[in-house]
Amino acid sequence: MDTIITGKRPKIAVRRELTLWKPFSAVLIMLWLTGCGINNIPTYDEQVKSAWSQVENQYQRRADLVPNLVETVKGFAEQERETLTAVIEARAKATSIQVDDSILNDPQKLQQFQQVQGELTSALSRLMAVSERYPDLKSNQNFLTLQSQLEGTENRIAVARRDFIQAVQQYNTEIRTFPGRIWHSLMYSDMPIRENFEATATNADEAPKVEF
């Protein structure tokens, strides 16, 4: 008796193939989503936060140098009370602002942070200029060490600010351009455009001149 082939596949075989295709399809969907940039916005947001942490660290490093620097200058130039007081007050303002990731969502607070840091930069510049009038201070080993540390910290601040600016630019560009703009509207609408650093005071972006 001849076997008749109808062309129909058994239901069990079809179900088995569908079961095998499910995990494969899930992997394909995950790869497609990854390749189309769905993770770019949160990734760039984390880079902004990381860059901001470095900005905070370097400004804090500078603030930590100020007390020793003021005390050293005072030992040789106590009569420069106005300049010393200006540095102390500028440091107090700079350290009074609580800085964390939340500041990135508050443009007014970020601007205030920039302003007080610019005031401290200016005050330190004036303090360094004062030292020119005191040869004994300029040759003091403790002062020379603090001078070197301050100069290095100002350079680190400049680098940290540059990295932060670039990270914010990348994040904002992703949100405003295709396909990031679509993903932002669908999934990340609670993640706002980030404010960036701007010059808020004269020579705010310049390191104090500490060369002798």
Image (cartoon, rainbow, N blue to C red):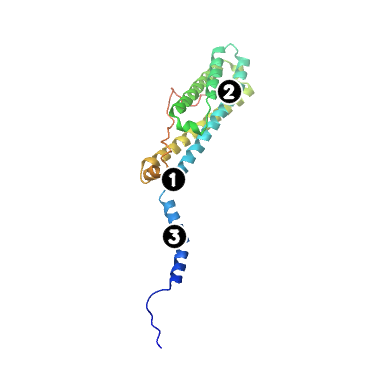
Element type at mark 2: helix
Bin the neighbour count of mark 3 within 10 Å (Cα to Cα): few under 14, some 14-19, many 20 and up.
few
Disc with the residue nearer the chain's start (1 vs 3): 3
Q: Is residue 61 above or below residue 10?
A: above
Question: What is the CA distance from the residue labelled 2 to the residue labelled 1?
Answer: 40 Å
Q: Is residue 102 above or below residue 22?
A: above
* Residue corresponding to mark 1: 40
Amino acid residing under circle 2: Val
Foreground disc of the pair 2, 1: 1
Q: Residue at x 42, y 44 (%)?
A: 187
Residue to which mark 2 is pinned: 66
Residue 135: name its quadrant. Answer: top right
Residue on which disc 3 sits: 25
**Quadrant position of the C terminus in the picture:** top right
Instruction: Identify the residue at horizontal 43%, vertical 43% (top origin).
Output: 41
Q: CA distance from mark 3 to mark 2?
A: 60 Å
Q: What percent of the width, then of the height, locates residue 143?
A: 61, 22
Q: CA distance from mark 1 to mark 3?
A: 23 Å
Q: Are marks 3 and 2 in contact (CB under 8 Å)?
A: no
Relative to 46, say whether 117 is above or below.
above
Q: Quadrant of the N terminus?
A: bottom left
Return the residue found at the far left: 178
Mark 1: amino acid: Asn
Query: Is residue 161 visible in this depiction of the protein?
Result: yes
Q: Nearer the viewer, residue 46 or 64?
A: 46
* The image quarter in which residue 87 lies: top right
